[in-house]
Amino acid sequence: MKALILSCNTGGGHNAAGHALKEAFEDAGHRCDVVDTIALTNQKVSDFVSDAYLNMVNRVPEAFGMAYNLWGNMSSEKRKSPLYYMRKLDSKNILRLVERERYDVILATHIIAAESLTALKKDDFLQTTPCIYINTDYTCVPFEEDINCDRIIIPHRDLLEEFLDHGLAAEKLLPLGIPVKKTFSKGIGRTEARAALEIPEDMPMVLMMGGSMGFGNLPKYTAALKKVFDHPFLLYIICGNNEDMRAALQKRFEGDPSIRLVGYTDRVSDYMAACDVLLSKPGGLSSTEALVSGTPLVHTPPIPGCETANAEFFDAHGLSYAAGGPEEAAEKARLLCDDPAARERMKNAQKENAYGSCALDIVLLSEQLLSKMRPDR
């Protein structure tokens, strides 16, 4: 089987989900490619969309929240959205790629790609090619009622009612989770992780992440953590690709032995395994990585929109503590660090709500759908 995964460069989460799926497909002996959907039309357009998105959510997140709410008000199962008609114009680029490379199954980790697949299905293309959409946030985002893929993967069973209320077909919805790489579900233990990362075994450790692009005022959170902890601790900060943020942290906290700065890294699962508590914005992927790996979690304030729903879902299910700002986040991090019972309660809730085999389950689903839709293959 040859699989195509369509992603989009608006933040790192959709690509992370795509590469987690690629890993699972290849582990199962299948071929798989991850492709930027918008770049199929024009790489410059993709770069522009990515830069515009990142600038908006980083510099004026309130504007993004207003736009998200506006899209939500426009969203209706009675009519197709403007996004659908925009993607319909570009959908033939996907079709040409599929026909040229002879892909057997197509998976979309972003609604932009799923809208294109929906348009192709509506025009009677891809009728024997399984198309699967993977929702990567803990809510039904605006315009998802448009989606008419063969299956729609949602993050949790408790979200089924919300998706049904938005008009999505019950027979297409499957609560399988959000795909993450196997290092998170089958990662190393705390002692082994600390040894691998050369972190002292006996020191409390807080891990702080700002997302793939280093969102958030990390210096403020660092100062708040240093103020609230009345005993020695280690703070590891993953700054992502945000070199300006890393430079600001270095300038302000240079020489502080308790603070360790980490740039972009592919060892996030090891750092999560090593820490006592994680501070992170409530992105769908990073939150799921913490959930699956059993990492006690404090959510920093969300980018308004789907991240708000992510934080609310996790807090309501006991999977994280939601914080309104640096001081509250620091207090809750200290509480989790100093209270083994609180950490254990959160870990138990995470264990009950994690879908650690999501990526593999989607591979198995793809195989089943292909066998059903192409019985003579």
Image (cartoon, rainbow, N blue to C red):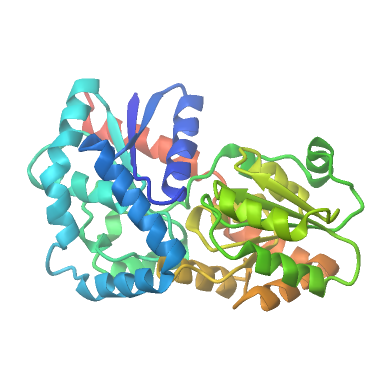
Residue 15, visible in the rendered structure? yes
Q: Residue 212 location in percent, x, y? A: 52, 49
Q: Residue furthest front?
A: 251
Q: Residue 243 location in percent, x, y? A: 58, 48
Residue 83: quarter of image: bottom left
Residue 245: quarter of image: bottom right
Q: Is residue 201 left or right of residue 104?
A: right
Q: Residue 301 location in percent, x, y? A: 55, 71
Residue 267: quarter of image: top right
Q: Tell me what residue is drawn at x 41 percent, y 23 percent.
A: 30
Q: Tell me what residue is drawn at x 50 percent, y 59 percent.
A: 283
Q: Note whether 100 is above or below 209 in the view shown.
A: above
Q: Tell me what residue is drawn at x 34 percent, y 24 percent.
A: 1
- Counting every numbered tag in the picture gives 0
Q: Residue 184 location in percent, x, y? A: 62, 44
Q: Tell me what residue is drawn at x 62 percent, y 60 percent.
A: 352
Residue 134, visible in the rendered structure? no
Q: Residue furthest left?
A: 123
Q: Note whether 249 is above or below 226 in the view shown.
A: above
The C terminus appears in which quarter of the rendering?
Answer: top left
Q: Is residue 110 left or right of residue 310?
A: left
Q: Is residue 7 left or right of residue 324?
A: left
